[in-house]
Image: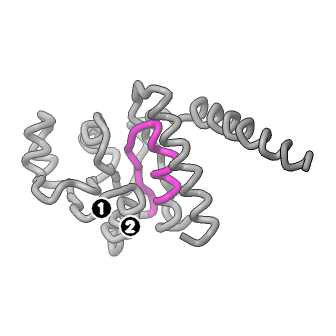
Amino acid sequence: MRWLIRLIAFVPLLWALGFAAFVILLPGPADIKARTDAIVVPTGGPGRIARGIEVLAAGSAPRMFISGADRSTSAASIARVGSLDRRLFACCVDIGHEASNTRANAEETLEWLQGRKAKSLRLVTTDWHMPRARFELERVIGRDVRIVSDAVDSEADLSVLAREYNKFLLRRVAALGGL
């Protein structure tokens, strides 16, 4: 019985230590000059698409894929709303409309990557979302494609960070179970 009490007391401590590490180790932006074969931007957070376009305009990748856009969203509307360079959207940006969550973003990205012979990609997402987004992407594309994490800085509060940490943990546990 005593071991059970210790175990129950240990779990919150383990969660708290993991959460502290999660917050402390949140990634930052990558070097804009780091070249990759593609840029992938899952929708859902401020600054993601603008950062992707900034990297594309710098010539650090030839194409960008925006995953999880609403079906009614076009490249022109994204460019207009974000005051972004429409010429870059016309020549070099593809938009996926099927994904509705992080796991589906990874699967949609895999479909987009097929036939492109990409050996590297830059994942642009919010700093707190990066660990889970990268985990999902690595699960579907494997180790043949090098992923560069390019995190958009956020001012997330503790509730956002705790919620994302819990999603990350649950996803890792589900993956262990084959889901």
179 and 63: which is toward the camera: 179
Q: Which region is colored magenta? A: 119-136
| CB contact under 8 Å: marks 2 and 1 | yes
The residue sitting at 27% across, 44% down in the picture is: 56
Is 123 or 179 nearer to us in this picture? 179
The image shows residue 158 at horizontal and vertical percentages of: 50, 28
Q: Which mark is residue 125?
A: none
**Rendered location of residue 170, percent (x, y):** 56, 54
Q: Is residue 93 left or right of residue 108?
A: left
62, above or below 18, in the image: below
Measured along the vertical axis of the image, is residue 177 above or below residue 35? below
Does residue 134 show up magenta in the picture?
yes
The kind of residue on which mark 2 rests is Glu
Q: Secondary structure at mark 1?
A: loop
Compared across the picture, whether 28 is left or right of 91 comes to: right
Q: How far apart, in angstroms, are the residues tagged by discs 2 and 1?
A: 8 Å
**Quadrant of the drawing holding the C terminus:** bottom right
On residue 107, the disc is 2
Whether residue 129 appears in magenta in the rendering, the answer is: yes
Residue 4 seen from this side: yes
Residue found at x 15% / y 49%: 89
Q: Regarding mark 2 in the picture, which secondary structure is present there?
A: helix
In the rendered image, residue 161, in percent from the top left (x then y), is placed at 49, 34
Q: Hey, which residue is sitting farthest bottom in the picture?
A: 115
Task: Give the amino acid at mark 1.
Answer: Ala
Badge number at residue 99: 1
**At 38% from the left edge and 70% from the top edge, which residue is drawn?**
117
In the image: residue 54, left or right of residue 72: right
Chain-order first, disc 2 or disc 1: 1
